[in-house]
Image (cartoon, rainbow, N blue to C red):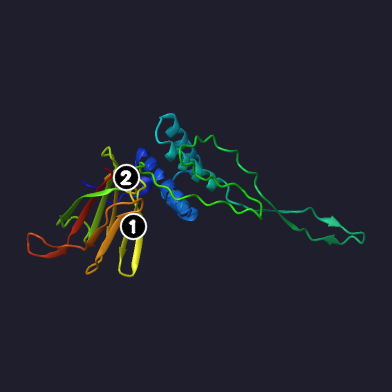
Amino acid sequence: MRVLDAEPVALRADFKDQSRSVIAAAYTATGNLPRARARLALLGDPDPIGALNAQAQRSLANSQSDEQADQLAALASALGQETVFKPTLAPVTQTKNGNPIPPTLTATLPSSPPDLPIQYTETPQAIGTLASPSTPTPRPTLTSTSTPGAPFSLTGQETICDSDLPEGLLQVIVFNSSRRQIAGAAIIVTWEGGEEQIYTGFKPELGNGYADFIMLPNVTYTLRLGMGSDIATGLAAPSCETNGGASFAGSIKLTFQQP
């Protein structure tokens, strides 16, 4: 049985690792911490920060992508350094006439967590720290998890008439030059009056380099990769028929690869 929409909490441990990598890559690109926190919550980790740090250490120990480890550690650091005010009550004191003075509220900040042992590569990621009121915290720079090099080429475009798939499904698969699928690749879909950005890797059961988008009827779309690629234009849900003659909106599958 082909699973199309599994709940993130039900994924295997290795698929959860892939999901954390994609979430960290998306946070690095957008700086949207609330969205990253919400996506991590779907994985059901008892300690999301600990899970991110542990995966970053595993990635370094297994000689995997240093950039990926940096992104995981940066997200863990950002989550751990969120400002939390803990109000405390001052002790009750007495005046000379015996009347008590009402307690006052004071706020204390948690101490900064220790720096993480991160090994930076060619493009170090910014890791936020608690800054003084006069010093703004730098935002992360826009990066992607794809390998550096030439922009991506549109290597395949296929019309699919499969009534088992959602109607109007636009599927995108992204490969690097070694024909390995890339997670965390930004994909920009535009149409008249609208635009949406999606990322590969959020459905690891369908592939690390897989992403999809639902096309509306009678709408024409344009698609490109955020890090540079050929542009696919004139995309619209194809008209298909079942064996019984019933019409439905088919799907389109696009394949991009780095030369």
- Left or right: where 101 falls relative to 178: right
- Measuring 58% from the left and 38% from the top, which residue is drawn there? 115
How far apart are the two marked residues, 1 and 2, measured between alpha carbons? 18 Å
Do the residues under discs 1 and 2 have CB atoms within 8 angstroms?
A: no
SS class of the residue under badge 1? strand
Whether residue 98 is visible: yes
Q: Tag 2: Cα neighbours inside 10 Å, few (<14), some, or many (≥20)?
A: few
Q: Tag 1: Cα neighbours inside 10 Å, few (<14), some, or many (≥20)?
A: some
- Measuring 25% from the left and 66% from the top, which residue is drawn there? 216
Looking at the image, residue 22 lies above or below residue 59: below
- Total numbered labels placed on residues in the image: 2
Task: Give x and y (percent) for residue 79.
Answer: 53, 48
- Left or right: where 81 falls relative to 225: right
- Measuring 27% from the left and 53% from the top, which residue is drawn there? 230
Residue 237 in which image quadrant = bottom left
Label ID, residue 150: 2
Label ID, residue 188: 1
Whether residue 41 is visible: no
Q: Residue furthest left?
A: 244
Task: Give x and y (percent) for residue 171.
Answer: 25, 53
Q: Earlier in the sequence, mark 1 or mark 2?
A: 2
Screen quadrant of the C terminus: top left
